[in-house]
Amino acid sequence: MRRNIVLIGMMGAGKTAIGAELARRLGRPFWDTDSEIERAAAMTIPEIFARDGEDFFRARESEVLSRVLASGSSIVSTGGGSWIREQNRQRIAQHGVSVWLDCDAETLWHRVRARPTRPLLQTVDPRGTLERLLAERSPIYASADLRVTATRADSIEDTTNRVLDSIAALEPMILEPK
Ligand SMILES: Nc1ncnc2c1ncn2[C@@H]1O[C@H](COP(=O)(O)OP(=O)(O)OP(=O)(O)O)[C@@H](O)[C@H]1O
Ligand SMILES: O=C(O)C1=C[C@@H](O)[C@@H](O)[C@H](O)C1
Ligand SMILES: [Mg+2]
């Protein structure tokens, strides 16, 4: 049954923060695929990228995603690149509703620039890289079931309310207790 709620979108869009709040409000399990990958490997994401490379990370990401979706009615916060792989999109569509947290480049940059935890932004021009990734990925993120804008002006609470409202309008059964 498609009862998982899966948050997708760029790094810094708020997937982890909003996902944790959704899980708290709905009383459902919460999984963050980045954290699960780190836990299983006993390494940080930058360490995994540095030692084993991005392809290895993407393979682990697909495995973790399948595993957490199997639980059936969780809130799943994905990594920024998860939705880009077609096999992940299919798996998510089978097991849940996908919600794109759509965030502008200014907000994303404001949130991610302070933390060196995103290996894809370790370039000479990290802001330019972020903008390029956003432009490349947005048409793919747009194929999610739902799109909720999540910009700097919105609190975590506001954005969480809008995610819940949009799911209620599309598929209210997903929000019902088991
Ligand atoms: N709506 C919001 N209002 C205020 N702060 C927010 C909001 N959403 C996220 N934040 C803050 O922005 C930062 C980045 O958010 P978060 O880590 O949830 O992004 P993410 O989408 O999970 O990124 P990644 O793909 O890199 O894991 C965090 O410090 C978080 O608390
Ligand atoms: O946007 C991306 O491709 C990534 C985002 C993060 O959540 C991590 O999954 C990793 O840093 C890669
Ligand atoms: Mg996250």
Image (cartoon, rainbow, N blue to C red):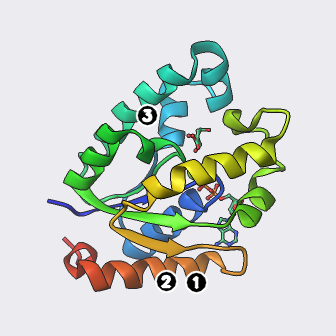
Q: CA distance from mark 1 to mark 3?
A: 29 Å
Quadrant housing the N terminus: bottom left
Determine whether the residue tagged by mark 1 lies in a helix, strand or loop. Answer: helix
Mark 1 and mark 3 lie on one chain; the one further toward the N terminus is 3
Determine whether the residue tagged by mark 2 lies in a helix, strand or loop. Answer: helix
Location of residue 16 by image quarter: bottom right
Q: Residue at x 42, y 47 (%)?
A: 83
Query: As displayed, is residue 81 above or below residue 101?
Result: above
To which residue does mark 3 refer?
61
Q: Residue at x 60, y 53 (%)?
A: 135
Q: CA distance from mark 2 to mark 1?
A: 5 Å
Q: Residue at x 49, y 22 (%)?
A: 55
Density class for disc 2 (Cα within 10 Å; few <14, some 14-19, many ≥20) is some
Q: Residue furthest left?
A: 1
Location of residue 5 by image quarter: bottom left
To which residue does mark 2 refer?
161
